[in-house]
């Protein structure tokens, strides 16, 4: 008995150590807190609190996988710990694993309904999963518990803007700013979220554009010297993406936006004392960074990036891939196998800057700027001596930090340099190495969904925001000329956007005393195989006017489907017409909307002409695919720049 008591006295006072560790943790002394928790676990390996708090330290250090491991061990011992469930959800959310995160947040709320952060973060998870109504319910629940939550109003604003309820969304951003006057993200969103994705019938696009310009001017003033360092968090939260869907010159607006982004990101870089690298070429392999969120089965990857990783000369160029996204598939694994160095998110902005700076890159290429917030933030910094963008988003970036814009000879109009703040570089032909993606042969067994027998079937493949209201008249004009036909549109993941387009088209058909339902079908979004089956059985592909299709147009070519395009004023409106001209099928490129109607009617009506077009497409489509000339030209550019 006395021997046991003697050993007992040698044990440390675990409660005292835990208490001290918690105090260190609250004060932000993570190393001291970690040491205390580990000391307790050395004597009590199943201490739930220490496992949980060690996991939280891992989360604070952005070691999110480690956080999941530790907090999961704590919850295996005590599943009813609401705060641990919430923190496990936070770790999963930081990893981009929103399904797992949402399950944890729901469990935390079940255990402790008043956990405001669990409701809020569940709303974030639901928005990422596309479950917008449930996300809105979460943010409204936050407001029930904390009516003055500026963050909940801000997130509701984004949900409303996702559904094109712009005025309601702006009201939410305004309320967020009233509750928290120094809220950069809300100020940014209030200025830049003003242009609808899809215009409703009767809306004047010019009014929205003018409103956007005025709001951007206000935003430039709002971010004065006092606020600039905090502005980095706002950059990219809303991007002027919708400007591209109007066939107007956007350079001036995008340069103003780009200068603001660069100013705010530069202030952030200076405030955080982050590196400004200027590597020198040593005569060895050139270190080329590719920064993108689309290293996966995505149109940007297939159209542009994959060819670089597959065919750039690896004896002269070392490709460093920085995958900003969280998703992985077989294309991600392929990119990893071809890269000299591959890094993937999620990680915060400072860690991305550190990783890119550590690579000492000589050139950085951003395949798409304008689609992913972190890409815009990084592109607004000077992280390499030479920085270039490409046409994953086919519009000038307006950023003073981007030196070159990599485009294509066959896609640009004469005098195109005037459309860019960057120096324009046009690579040969279509500017890319594109591999055929295995078009399906027409099935003898059944008609594809949506195909109507014995009438011309006209594929209209664009997302709703690619259809400008001034072109709505084209579809009933074609219907009047053909008599019987079927336009095949596709329902967007946000059905309200497709409904706006449908209502506009209904009005356009009614204006010509035609019934929309007799001519137009909105199909559900199809798998790639089903979409190719449909195109194999359709009669004409109607390219979108002003913002053309590229990957979908190439799929149509693979299926032998004739394309009619109206050539645009800018790169974004010339993708399909460039494909047609490359195949020596310029006869299918219209110079006006009226000629576009004439061409569609001719191809749809004339079966012999259509058959001849299919034969010519089959004979010439090899010109489009596996073209190494753009790769060789890109190599020359990289060596000379």
Image (spheres, rainbow, N blue to C red):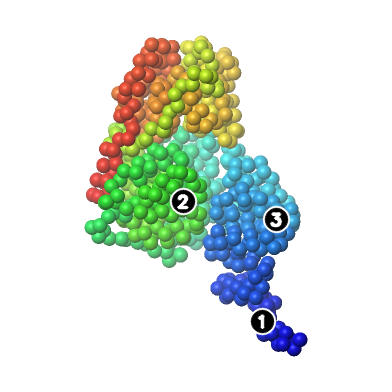
Instruction: Answer whether residue 83 is visible to the viewer in this image.
Output: no
Mark 2–mark 1 Cα distance, whole angstroms, equals 46 Å
- Say few, some or many: other residues with alpha carbon within 10 Å of mark 3 (under 14 / 14 to 19 / 20 or more): many
**Residue 185 drawn above or below residue 62:** above
**Residue 480 drawn above or below residue 583:** above
Closer mark to the observer between disc 2 and disc 1: 1
Label 2: element kind: loop
Q: Name the residue located 51 percent from the left edge and 11 percent from the top edge.
A: 454
Numbered marks: total: 3
In the visual, does 423 lie left or right of 510? left
Which residue is tagged 1?
Answer: 12
Residue 173 got which mark?
Answer: none
Which residue is tagged 2?
Answer: 324
Mark 2–mark 3 Cα distance, whole angstroms, equals 29 Å
* Residue 539 position within the rendered picture, expressed as x and y whole percent measured from the top left: 45, 18
* Residue 286 position within the rendered picture, expressed as x and y whole percent measured from the top left: 28, 54
Which residue is tagged 3?
Answer: 108
Q: Indicate the quadrant where residue 86 lies.
A: bottom right
Q: Which residue is at the front of the view, 47 or 386?
A: 47
């Amino acid at each position: 008995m006395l021997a046991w008591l003697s050993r007992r006295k040698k044990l440390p006072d675990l409660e005292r150590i835990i208490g001290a560790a918690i105090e260190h943790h609250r004060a932000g002394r993570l190393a001291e807190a970690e040491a205390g928790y580990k000391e307790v676990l050395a004597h009590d390996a199943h201490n739930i609190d220490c496992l949980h708090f060690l996991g939280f330290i891992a989360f604070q250090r952005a070691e999110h996988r480690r956080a999941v491991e530790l907090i999961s061990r704590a919850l295996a011992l005590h599943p009813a710990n609401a705060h641990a469930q919430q923190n496990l959800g936070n770790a999963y959310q930081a990893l981009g694993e929103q399904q797992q995160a949402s399950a944890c947040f729901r469990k935390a709320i079940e255990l402790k309904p008043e956990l405001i952060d669990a409701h809020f973060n569940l709303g974030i998870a639901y928005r990422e999963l596309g479950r917008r109504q449930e996300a809105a319910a979460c943010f409204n629940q936050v407001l029930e518990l904390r009516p003055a939550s500026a963050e909940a109003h801000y997130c509701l604003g984004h949900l409303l803007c996702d559904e094109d309820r712009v005025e309601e969304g702006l009201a939410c951003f305004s309320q967020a700013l009233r509750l928290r006057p120094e809220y950069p993200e809300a100020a940014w969103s209030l200025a830049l979220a003003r242009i609808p994705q899809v215009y409703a019938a009767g809306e004047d696009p010019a009014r929205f554009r003018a409103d956007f310009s005025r709001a951007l001017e206000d935003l430039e003033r709002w971010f004065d010297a006092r606020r600039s360092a905090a502005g980095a968090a706002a950059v990219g939260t809303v991007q002027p993406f919708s400007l591209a869907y109007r066939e107007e010159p956007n350079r001036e607006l995008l340069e103003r936006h780009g200068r603001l982004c660069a100013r705010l990101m530069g202030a952030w870089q200076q405030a955080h004392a982050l590196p400004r690298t200027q590597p020198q070429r040593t005569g060895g392999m050139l270190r080329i960074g590719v920064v993108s969120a689309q290293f996966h089965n995505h149109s940007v990857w297939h159209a542009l990036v994959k060819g670089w990783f597959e065919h750039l000369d690896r004896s002269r160029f070392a490709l460093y891939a920085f995958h900003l996204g969280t998703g992985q598939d077989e294309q991600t694994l392929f990119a990893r196998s071809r890269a000299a160095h591959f890094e993937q998110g999620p990680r915060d902005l400072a860690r991305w800057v550190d990783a890119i700076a550590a690579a000492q890159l000589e050139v950085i290429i951003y395949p798409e700027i304008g689609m992913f917030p972190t890409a815009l933030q990084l592109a607004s910094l000077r992280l390499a001596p030479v920085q270039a963008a490409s046409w994953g988003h086919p519009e000038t970036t307006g950023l003073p930090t981007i030196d070159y814009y990599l485009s294509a000879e066959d896609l640009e109009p004469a005098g195109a340099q005037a459309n860019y703040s960057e120096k324009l570089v046009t690579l040969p032909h279509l500017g890319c190495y594109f591999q055929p993606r295995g078009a399906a042969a027409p099935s003898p067994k059944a008609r594809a969904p949506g195909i109507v027998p014995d009438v011309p079937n006209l594929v209209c493949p664009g997302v709703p925001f690619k259809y400008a209201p001034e072109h709505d008249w084209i579809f009933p004009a074609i219907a009047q000329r053909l008599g019987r036909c079927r336009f095949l549109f596709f329902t967007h993941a946000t059905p309200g956007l497709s409904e706006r387009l449908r209502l506009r088209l209904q009005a356009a058909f009614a204006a010509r005393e035609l019934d929309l339902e007799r001519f137009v079908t909105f199909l559900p979004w199809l798998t790639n195989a089903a979409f190719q089956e449909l195109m194999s059985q359709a009669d004409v592909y109607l390219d979108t006017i002003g913002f053309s299709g590229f990957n979908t147009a190439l799929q149509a070519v693979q299926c032998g489907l004739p394309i009619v395009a109206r050539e645009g004023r800018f790169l974004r409106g010339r993708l399909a017409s460039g494909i047609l001209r490359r195949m020596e099928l310029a006869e299918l490129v219209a110079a006006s909307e009226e000629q576009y109607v004439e061409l569609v009617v001719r191809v749809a009506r004339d079966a012999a002409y259509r058959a001849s077009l299919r034969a010519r497409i089959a004979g010439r489509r090899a010109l489009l695919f596996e073209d190494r000339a753009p790769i060789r030209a890109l190599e020359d550019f990289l060596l000379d720049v």
